[in-house]
Amino acid sequence: MTLLTNRRTFLGTAAAAALVSASRVPVSLARADAGGLKLGVASYSLRKFPRSEAIQMLKKLQVSYVSIKSFHLPYETPGAELIAGSNEFREAGIKVLSGGNINLNNPATLRQMFEYAKTAGIPMMVCAPSHATMGQVEELVKEFDIKIAIHNHGPEDKEFPSPESALEVVANRDPRMGLCIDIGHTTRTGANLLEWIRRAGPRLFDVHVKDLRDVMDKDSQCDVGEGAMPIVSIFQELKRMNYQGGVMLEYEINADNPLLGMAKSLSYMRGVLDGLAV
């Protein structure tokens, strides 16, 4: 662990220096599938920036995978513009793994959300449905052939606070219905994070990564590697499972100037994977 910690410190410092001095990132950030995992970014991390600028920031970070938030691809965008906007990510060399988080708790707008994803070429919706809409959502999953990943939102979420609550509702449904485990929100429920990653198994479609100095306090978020999250153990488990989904940095702090913290976080994550590969 000392080796990983030292590597984290070195790579984080290298990332900071590179970004400040020359708008570059260290080589360790430039690999798309570090250690066999698809490391990417949930574009909510860049919510204060327009799509074109957000894409340039992702390129600066050498990110090859993205989950697009509606800030960067609004739901009301006309069809041709929606296609063009989504393609801007792909033309920049960034693969769109998903979109979200998308609200699927209003029966009146469910079809609109699936049409949005289909038009934009988004293969999976990270989403917030309700228990009441699950039957309709399943029918639309079958009709549109679009996967959904229920995002748990912690103790405040009245529908799906934990991975357990989401897994219960998808377990006997269409195999294209699964989970996006948010590791920060999960620990705040008191759930055993590694246990629920294992239990989710093939229903685990996406993972949102963040770090907390206090795993029970959502306001203690920090750069990944500086908090109490068991990142090494999480990555070990994902690799053991041969997990094929996205491992997406969701950087919710420093919204006006997130690039440096994101670079440090990605550098740490790739450093951990390098250490696990030794």
Image: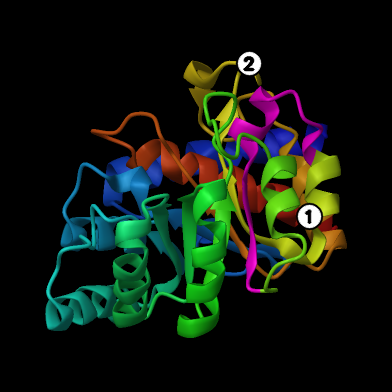
Foreground mark, 1 or 2, reads 1
Q: Is residue 232 visible?
A: yes
Between 47 and 189, which is closer to the camera in this rendering?
A: 189
**Residue drawn 84% across and 63% down?**
241
Magenta highlight range: 176-193
For residue 278, what is the image quadrant? bottom right
Disc 1 marks which residue?
200
Question: Is there CB contact under 8 Å for labels 1 and 2?
Answer: no
- Helix, strand or loop at label 1? It is helix
x, y percentage for residue 265?
52, 41
x, y percentage for residue 60?
33, 59
Q: Is residue 187 magenta?
A: yes
**Residue drawn 30% across and 59% down?**
108
- Helix, strand or loop at label 2? It is loop
Q: Is residue 235 above or below residue 205?
A: above
Q: Amino acid at mark 1?
A: Ala
Q: Amino acid at mark 2?
A: Asp
Name the disc covering residue 52, or none.
none
For residue 94, what is the image quadrant? bottom left
Between 86 and 166, which is closer to the camera in this rendering?
A: 166
Name the disc covering residue 214, or none.
2
Q: Is residue 228 magenta?
A: no
Of the image marks 1 and 2, the number of the one nearer the N terminus: 1
Between 17 and 53, which is closer to the camera in this rendering?
A: 53
